């Protein structure tokens, strides 16, 4: 059992909750300075609980907790405001983001920069006419900040700068390698311009957006060890409907 601690006024977000016994919740939170961790919210499902209407996903909170075990005890949660409720497509994007964080982040492994990126993305989603560029930037930052750096500016086989007009195939754990012109239509092929756009955080070009989505999906699936993402299946089902 770990040493007992008391943490107060820690910025955080609820990633997921599930019932515990008759009146309580286990709350999976993403905190800025302590990473992802589970908290026991005693009595949170009771009608008069002070945290009943506070423990909402995608809303900025200040959280107090205590304890020394794997599951700490929630002491207090305060909504800090300023974040519109997500709805429609933005809500689906939020669900996807939370699933990524739950699957990628080890318990109590802090990533303050990633936390700030996540908070900024949630603020931007409600007014985003096209959320896809926002998601691609976050996915790329997630991989980089967790140590899965994505080589984009240099060719893996020659160490030469990527050429905007070049055709490439991306090899996991190595990076982009030159492809023959006839390979341009094969799965996994992408242009040098896409790689350079990704490196610069530019996702406005339709080709860049299409090719970067395929590449990042492939990399995320690889680093998740083949785990499926329920949010992706939900997207596909909604598109079918």
Image (spheres, rainbow, N blue to C red):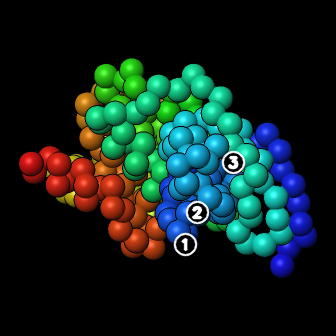
Give the alpha-carbon distance from disc 2 to disc 1, as whole Å.
6 Å
Answer left or right for 190 relative to 221.
left
> Does the rendering let one see residue 194?
no
- Discs 1, 3 touching: Cβ within 8 Å: no
Q: What residue did someone put label 2 on?
A: 24
Specify few, some or many for label 3: CA neighbours under 10 Å numbering under 14, 14-19, or 20 or more: many
Whole-percent x, y for residue 76 in the image: 73, 46
Give the alpha-carbon distance from disc 1 to disc 3, as whole Å.
25 Å
Picture quadrant where residue 219 is located: bottom left
Answer left or right for 108 relative to 187.
right
Give the alpha-carbon distance from disc 2 to disc 3, as whole Å.
20 Å
Looking at the picture, does residue 217 appear above or below residue 165? below
Q: Which mark is residue 21?
A: 1
Looking at the picture, does residue 32 appear above or below residue 116? below
Nearer to us of marks 2 and 3 is 2
Q: Residue at x 27, y 41 (%)?
A: 210
Q: Residue at x 42, y 42 (%)?
A: 94
Could you tell me which secondary element the residue under label 1 belongs to?
Answer: loop
Q: Which mark is residue 47?
A: none
Looking at the picture, does residue 123 appear above or below residue 185? above
> Does the rendering let one see residue 14?
yes
Could you tell me which secondary element the residue under label 3 belongs to?
Answer: strand
- Discs 2, 1 touching: Cβ within 8 Å: yes
Whole-percent x, y for residue 21 in the image: 55, 72
Whole-percent x, y for residue 180 in the image: 26, 54
Q: What residue did someone put label 3 on?
A: 31
Could you tell me which secondary element the residue under label 2 belongs to?
Answer: strand
Q: Residue at x 17, y 54 (%)?
A: 237
Along the viewing direction, whichever of 56 and 10 lies nearer the viewer? 56
């Amino acid at each position: 059992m770990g040493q007992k601690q008391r943490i107060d006024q820690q910025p955080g977000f609820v990633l997921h909750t599930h019932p515990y016994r008759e009146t309580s919740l286990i709350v999976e939170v993403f905190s800025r300075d302590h990473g992802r961790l589970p908290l026991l919210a005693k009595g949170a499902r009771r009608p008069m609980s002070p945290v009943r209407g506070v423990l909402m996903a995608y809303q900025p909170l200040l959280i107090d907790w205590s304890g020394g075990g794997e599951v700490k005890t929630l002491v207090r949660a305060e909504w800090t405001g300023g974040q519109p409720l997500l709805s429609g497509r933005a809500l689906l994007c939020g669900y996807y983001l939370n699933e990524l964080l739950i699957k990628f982040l080890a318990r109590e492994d802090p990533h303050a920069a990633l936390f700030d990126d996540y908070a900024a993305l949630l603020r931007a989603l409600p007014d985003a006419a096209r959320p896809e560029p926002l998601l691609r930037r976050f996915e790329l930052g997630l991989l980089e900040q967790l140590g899965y750096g994505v080589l984009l500016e240099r060719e893996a086989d020659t160490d030469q700068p990527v050429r905007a007009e070049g055709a490439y195939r991306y090899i996991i754990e190595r990076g982009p390698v030159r492809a023959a012109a006839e390979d341009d239509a094969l799965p996994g092929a992408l242009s040098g311009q896409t790689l350079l756009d990704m490196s610069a955080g530019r996702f406005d070009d339709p080709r860049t957006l299409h090719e970067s989505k395929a590449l990042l999906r492939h990399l995320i699936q690889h680093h998740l060890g083949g785990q499926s993402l329920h949010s992706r299946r939900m997207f596909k089902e909604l598109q079918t409907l």
